Image (cartoon, rainbow, N blue to C red):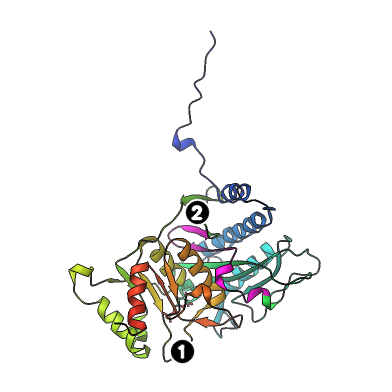
Amino acid sequence: MTVVHSWGPPPPSAMPGTTLDRHILERQRQTPGATGDFSGLFQQISLAAKLINSRVRQAGLAGMLGLTGQTNVQGEHVQKLDEYANNVMIRSTEAGGHLCLMASEEDDEVIKIPERFPTGKYVLLFDPLDGSSNIDVGVTIGTIFSVHRRVTMGRAGTLADCLQRGSVQVAAGYVLYGSSTMLVYSTGDGVHGFTYDPSVGEFFLSHENLRVPTQGSSYSVNEGNTSRWSDGMKRWVDWLKEEDSETHRPYGARYVGSLVADFHRTLLKGGVFAYPSDSKSPAGKLRLLYEASPLAFILESAGGIASDGTRRILDIQPKELHERTPLILGSRDDVNIALDFLQGRR
Ligand code: P6P
């Protein structure tokens, strides 16, 4: 008797999810003229994320905690994990022939591609491990990256290839080392989140086409800086804390003190994050090229707003590699109210 198999679709549990590599390759096939360069670079970034994640998860055991005693270009103590993450990002991507240059929060100058390797059309800028002051206390930290197309000719890229507006980024993303490890990225056409399965060693699509709610219910600021804020900033935060059911106030206060954690919550739940200029940091604290700009690119792709208080972050023309910027970002309605206060309309 011939057994006829009814090959219906396997049960969901048996279906392998969409891996990051497969997602990137499928988008490559849908992109006219794509050469596979970007896919190759992204696979290398994904590998770096897995390597950093592995160390982050065992930091306390691997003797990676504590300071190296050195300081980086920001004048901050370089933690062992910072150093490791920085080296991993560089070593994972320098040989692939996709990059003409790199830049990192941890390095004063641009990072050249060694002569022995071919160069390519992209520039990678990154903060290898943001929130490093939280490493020793087990709080969520993250890697942030930005990809630009080079604008110069010749083998090696130059600083000019780094100093580009955020609006022309090819892609931006971050890796969140939190209760789970996630990689979230955008090429400007939607925002997609992948959750890491350590038992398989793969990132699987878990949050497709993320959209930030038009309004949230939380605000994320360091109120320890209140005395340094402008009058508009003080009045805005006071307004958020008033009781008014019609406008869903008071808002809840949520502040991790790790940019990637505060951003990720704002992206998923809505609300507003602000690190404005203040009397101590007139230009703000956060970095434009490898913090504010990639996160603003992602947030706008998800329907949100990111401003420095007067300008759209993505419109700012960078002048220096490590320049800082004030940053207010989040749900469209919430950020617009903040800007009304900051710009004196309320
Ligand atoms: P503050 C962490 O050191 C960081 O660079 C960002 O991750 C975070 O958003 C910000 O600084 C926190 O700064 O002054 O509130 O500790």
Please tell me the numbered disc located at residue 282. Answer: 1
Neighbours of disc 2 within 10 Å: few (<14), some (14-19), many (20+): many
Residue 39's x, y, as percent? 64, 54
- Label 1 crowding class (10 Å Cα cut-off): few <14, some 14-19, many 20+? some
Residue 57 visible in rendering: yes
Q: CA distance from mark 2 to mark 1?
A: 36 Å
Q: Is residue 66 visible?
A: no
Q: How many marks?
A: 2
Q: What type is the residue that disc 2 sits on?
A: Phe
Q: Is residue 180 magenta?
A: yes
At horizontal 42% and vertical 60% (from top left) the residue drawn is 179
Q: Quadrant of residue 99?
A: bottom right
Q: Which numbered disc flags the more N-terminal residue, 2 or 1?
A: 2
Residue 309 in magenta stretch: no
Residue named by callout 2: 194
Residue at 44% over, 61% down: 302
Can you tell which quarter of the image residue 244 is in?
Answer: bottom left
Indicate which quadrant contains ligand 1. Answer: bottom left
Where's residue 48, x and y in %?
A: 61, 61
